[in-house]
Amino acid sequence: MSSENINTDIAIIGGGLSGLSLSILLAKEGFEVTLFEKKDYPRHKVCGEYISLESWDFLERIGIPLNTLNLPIISEVYLSSHQGTSLKSALPLGGFGISRFTLEELLFQKAQQVGVKVLTKTSIVSYSDNAVETQLGVKHFANLVIASYGKKTNFNIQVKPSTGQKYFALKWHMNADIPKDRIHLHFFEKGYIGSSQIEEGKTNACLIAAQELLENSENNIDQFMHRYVFKNKEAKELFENATLLFERPLSIGNITFSHRYPSGSNLLLCGDAAGMVAPLNGNGMSMAFYSAFLLAEQIKKYRKTPESKTLISNEYEKIWKKKFRNRLLVGNWLQHASLNNFAIPTILKIGKTIPALLPPLIKLTHGKPF
Ligand SMILES: Cc1cc2nc3c(=O)[nH]c(=O)nc-3n(C[C@H](O)[C@H](O)[C@H](O)COP(=O)(O)OP(=O)(O)OC[C@H]3O[C@@H](n4cnc5c(N)ncnc54)[C@H](O)[C@@H]3O)c2cc1C
């Protein structure tokens, strides 16, 4: 164990989307920022890789040149069920496709460029509100400690899950012939698979389903795909007509969702660490960026006040609840509805009869550009 002590102004635990974007915002304001990331860049991550357009301007503003990347802009959604019903609808704001591999690498490079000290392969094993300790026993003291370690970490801080239901997820990159401007969501019993284009004409396919389906399939992905996913004819056709670019899918398990900012935490929480929205909304990444933006605003506002820590913490929690609570409630309700065998066909039937109903429902799960 090392007994080395290091000082920094702001310590950020976790270099995913919220941690990286927050570090860039704060470094640009002149703060000395150290970001601790347990893995390395670039890396693939299980994700739908559809980002709501509300984040486009923000990313451009912090120096990510999206305009130069020729990314697919997605303006409609196509839904299908395993009972054979389908529906197309406009997406009120829409989104764009980019892989996590590329996006996080661009953010990582930008963070370093603006002076953030990014320590990769560095896991934080303990913390307080003014210090963090790495797996090597190095202690970093900081005026502010921010947790952006995502939905799961090695700490014992738990966001209260809204349900006991656990999900697992799989992701593939593939070459497939799907329209550039459309996201497909193919529902099957207790899950769905989403597919849409990312950079360089590739397609990302990401599946999320109730964890028990995999257990019912002897934890065998092939068996699970045939038994559940391919019951949806269009999901089956997606795989039949695609060339897979990964040898096997990336996977994660034990996913739960929450809608409450965890009270009593002595850390400032950003992104999924504060509350995770169900992926069906296609909005988690934008919420991660937006929460980083909101937290940076509070830090800038109160940085010179004597009671700054308490003020930042109280004001940020208030704003977080105002901006995200309803979105999380609606989004997580929709995710649970998608597990119900009757809900999706019913939504598709109603959507077909009254097409004007779907866009406002989608709108409820999204925010506005910031
Ligand atoms: C299956 C699935 C599909 C999704 N699809 C979409 C989608 O299509 N569109 C969308 O907008 N959102 C989607 N999301 C949600 C989105 O991925 C998250 O909301 C977003 O990644 C949150 O960013 P974050 O920075 O809070 O967390 P993360 O991106 O998870 O980053 C957390 C980081 O902290 C690091 N870390 C954790 N613990 C420690 C530690 N102790 N020390 C150091 N580092 C640590 C991790 O390695 C990680 O890099 C999806 C989520 C899932 C699960």
Image (cartoon, helix red, strand yellow):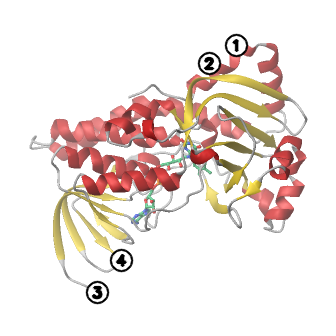
Query: Which residue is nearer to you in this view: 110 or 212?
Result: 110
Q: Are marks 2 and 1 in contact (CB under 8 Å)?
A: yes
* Residue drawn at 36 percent across, 71 percent down: 122
Report which residue position mark 3 lands on.
1
Return the disc, 1 or 4, that comes first in the chain's sequence: 4
Residue at the image position 42 percent from the left and 30 percent from the top: 323
- Quadrant including the N terminus: bottom left
Alpha carbon of mark 3 to alpha carbon of mark 2: how far? 56 Å
Question: Which amino acid type corresponds to the residue marked 1 in the rendered image?
Answer: Ala
**For residue 108, which quarter of the picture?**
bottom left
In the rendered view, would you say 134 is above or below 245?
below
Q: Position of residue 142 (x, y in %)?
A: 19, 60
Query: Distance between the Cα atoms at labels 1 and 4?
Result: 54 Å
Quadrant position of the C terminus in the picture: top left
* Residue 264 appearing in the image: no
Dot 3 alpha-carbon crowd within 10 angstroms: few under 14, some 14 to 19, many 20 or more: few
Mark 3: amino acid? Met
Query: Is 182 placed above or below 272 here?
Result: above
Instruction: Give whichever of discs 4 and 2 has the lower sequence position.
Output: 4
- The residue singled out by tag 4 in the image is 135
Q: Please rate how many residues cluster around mark 4, counting C-alpha atoms within 10 Å: few if below 14, some from 14 to 19, many from 20.
A: some
* Residue holding disc 1: 356
Q: Which numbered disc flags the more N-terminal residue, 4 or 3?
A: 3
Mark earlier in primary sequence (3, 2)? 3
Residue at coordinates 78% horizontally, 61% vertically from top-left? Answer: 214
